Image: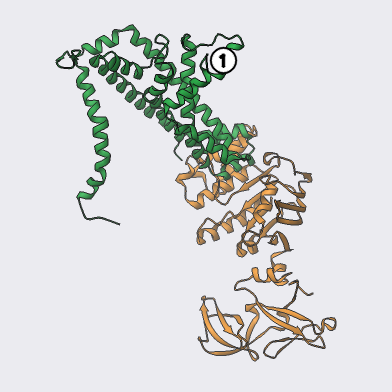
Amino acid sequence: MTFDSRLLPYLLLAPQVAVTLVFFIWPAAQAVWQSVHLQDAFGIRSEFVWFENFEHVLTDPNYLDTLKVTVVFSVAVTVLSMGTALLLAVLADSKIKGARAYKTLLIWPYALAPAVAAVLWMFIFNPDIGSFGRALRALGYDWDYRLNGGQALWMVIMAASWKQVAYNFIFFLAGLQAIPRSVMEAASIDGAGPVRRFLTITFPLLSPTTFFLLVVDMVYAFFETFGTIHALTQGGPGKATETLIFRVYHDGVVNNDLGGSSAQSVILMVIVIALTAVQFRFIERKVHYA
Amino acid sequence: MATVEIRDVRKSYGPVDAIKGIDIAIRDGEFLVLLGPSGCGKSTLLRMVAGLEGITGGEIAIGGRVVNTLEPKDRDIAMVFQNYALYPHMTVFDNMAYGLKIRGIPKAEIRARVDKAAEILELGRFLDRRPSQLSGGQRQRVAMGRAIVREPAAFLFDEPLSNLDAKLRTQMRVEIKRLQDRLRITSLYVTHDQVEAMTLADRILVMNHGVAEQIGTPLEVYQRPASLFVAGFIGSPPMNVLDGRIDDRGEAVLVPGGQRLPLPQPRPTDAGRPVKLGIRPEHMAVAAEGFSIEIELVEALGADTVVYGRLPDGETLLVRMAGIPTVRERDRMTVAPQADALHLFDAVSGRRME
């Protein structure tokens, strides 16, 4: 079917373009604008200050700590959620009883809002009211993520990974199911056992999926885990679980430092663009697209 | 090189019996074709030999060793799949070398074996390509090469040519035949194409509903079909089958319309018995006396002509004549079968009456 109207393609694109403009391009431009201005506390006057905001941010030792936390957090979340999802997907793809129910159950966590998921984790791990938290304390382990920074970081990593496992699982399962059964059968006739089949056939054929998820999960860990961290630890104790995105919110919304917060946003944006570019450039080369 | 013995092999999926006891011993170097319509269980039987399907009952032995509980990799077989099942992320060379690498064969020997197979299959130029860069026929060759380099005890082919177009299929069929004459490796070949079966097989096992209807050489199966099913499945156009009755003296078959066809040998014990009478279209000829048919359709195939005629009682009768058509639609003609070309089948069981 073809349409003669020259207008129609633009019309069909318009909603998507509008959403991108209003919710991405405009705020991003604002952030860039604000990152080179200094605003007074009441938001009435602002002054152009060149790169002063960036200078402040990048020379702040606290900011470098936050960066370290973010790196640990993002790498851990990506590795943990992808590894777990791949394992579960491989299991779900094999012929087991109740595979359908199992698949459905694994997809459910994705439907939860991050804050709701975080509250669930709190109910489990809270040292006073959480079932598992109390059990740990009863066993004599000094469990309190509200005081122990390492435990807090471990907990937000777990909560953030758990939610992303469902998403990764769907893609890995779809990727696995796209591998023709006969190819696996040919490999087993050629003499490959289950482990070798996975390493030499399944994993290479999954690489486009893996690469896609690697990019998505990094972006998720950087940006979308705000709700989880906010609900669980508010970046604490101290600044033990404060990631870059949480700091943007904290400095901008709580501390009213709009210029500094915007400068951080811009830095964050540059980091993610750079990471994605690096991933595309160096990892995609090794990725096989069947 | 090895024999493959299949002894009373059965397969059930819950209450459904897919294979109901197949017995056959395939000789060393023999090419056995499993022929049958879709759903007859031929692929299932092949996959049971490969170890890709469990065996519900009976025994399968390869080279004298019962393999029922062995993994596919321990059965020393190679398989060619209908959709080729090549490893898409590997080059042609790696596809063929994969099984050899796993078995720890030295690099130099792998190189030599793959090169030799590539030469036989004319794949030398493509060794560095990926399967996605090959045509269907070339992929099929790579799949064969992957089987050849392994030098297995037996080859298993699962409808290897059905994804190819008609011309390539004929070409590959000839190549498989040549390869088989050269390598003489015990082979099981599944197909629903009777031409492939007739041309490739040393013996054919005709399957229907999980049962072996007949096991025999291609000519035996054509000349002496063991049942009505085989008679209808082998031969194109299919055999004519008419209801009939052996006369009271056992000397002729009476067919509706009053025709009396004398039997080559009298069968006094079968006198009066109702039968199904089979006559191949190519064994009919124009005659002064015989079946009077009205011609409904004439198919001119060039080398020969197929005439669809209608008998007075409404039955269709096919006649195959050599050369270009000499009759036209709506003409009437009289045809008669060659005396020694009558096939008699039991009217109830459909088995051949010897």
- Of the 4 image quadrants, the one containing the C terminus of chain B is bottom right
Residue shown at 20% from the left, 19% from the top: A34
From the image, state the color of chain B.
orange
B116 relative position to B354: left or right: left
Residue B103 picture location, percent across and down: 65, 34
Residue shown at 28% from the left, 39% from the top: A16
Residue B31 quadrant: bottom right
Q: Secondary structure at mark 1?
A: helix
Residue shown at 25% from the left, 10% from the top: A55
Q: Is residue B90 visible?
A: no
With respect to residue B323, does B63 lie above or below?
above
Q: Viewer-proximal residue, A205 or B24?
A: A205
User: Badge 1: few (under 14), some or many (20 or more) residues near its Cα, within 10 Å?
Assistant: some
Residue A216 picture location, percent across and down: 40, 30
Residue at the disc numbered 1: A134
From the image, state the color of chain A.
green
A244 relative position to B94: left or right: left
